[in-house]
Amino acid sequence: MTNKNNLLDFNNFMNEILNEPARANEAYQKFHNYSSLNQWHAMAAMEKLEPINTYKRWQEMGRQVKKGAKAIALCMPIIVDVKDENGDKTGEKKQFFVFKNNWFKLSDTEGAEYTEVNTPPAFNLNKMLLALNIKTKDFEMINGNCQGYAIPTENTIAINPLAVDKFKTTIHEVAHCLLHSNEAVQMMHGDNLPKSIKEFEAESTAYLVKVSLGVFDGLEYSRDYIKSWLEGQKHELKEINFKRVLVAVNKILNAGTK
């Protein structure tokens, strides 16, 4: 699932999660303190998932990294200057795109006894909507087959009261608000995204949020839809589409648990 630079092959990554959703849940359980991107990088680097820490942190815990242990690469934030049109610095911001081999697995260390206490906080859908400033409105479509819809320009969603999977539909529509406002699309792509790619991004976000939280019921539609894209229309998907999905997953999980 990784290439020679220890970076994710996103197409293979998605296929693995579709085939092994329980592994994605295990990764979230163990690495929820890390970004979604880094959770998947850590998962890709291990056959058996186990706690990870930096060399220094293991030492602080009374454990020493064994000689010859191979480090795991995760994405590190760096601070970059924000400049105006004249090139003058107006502030700073974090960007996550530098990978460093700084993390080691528990089995790569020895020393003091290690007791794992790493339970993620419970996820609350209403807390998530409030934190992301997502508003809800009454469902007004006549088409009863429509499960829900989003109005990204208004940060608003509407869910069909008869939706088969209200939780998944809510996450799907929230993803549209996060990813598909005119401003968000313009900033990332420079032009409008095809509707089909927007649906891929939203459905993949909903799927990954569900499996991260261990909600495995009703995954069949999402799995089949995402697989059809990965297997039949790869040429239209770009790495940025997968990264946008992980950004949305991270925002949703953080908003619902903090």
Image: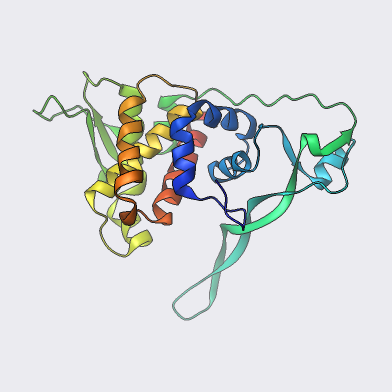
For the point 38% across and 56% down, which residue is it? 238
Q: Looking at the picture, does residue 70 appear above or below residue 186?
A: above
**Farthest bottom residue?**
86
Which is nearer the eye, 219 or 248? 219
Q: Position of residue 176 (x, y in %)?
A: 31, 42
Horizontal placement of 174 versus 22: left or right?
left
For the point 59% across and 66% down, which residue is it? 80
- Name the image quarter holding the C terminus: top right
Horizontal placement of 188 versus 91: left or right?
left
Which is nearer the eye, 33 or 128? 33
Q: Position of residue 87 (x, y in %)?
A: 51, 79
Residue 203: image quadrant is top left
Q: Position of residue 219 (x, y in %)?
A: 37, 25
Residue 192: image quadrant is bottom left
- Name the image quarter holding the N terminus: top right
Which is nearer the eye, 38 or 45? 45
Q: Position of residue 227 (x, y in %)?
A: 35, 38
**Farthest left residue?**
142
For the point 18% across and 27% down, which residue is it? 139
Q: Looking at the picture, does residue 4 appear above or below residue 91?
A: above
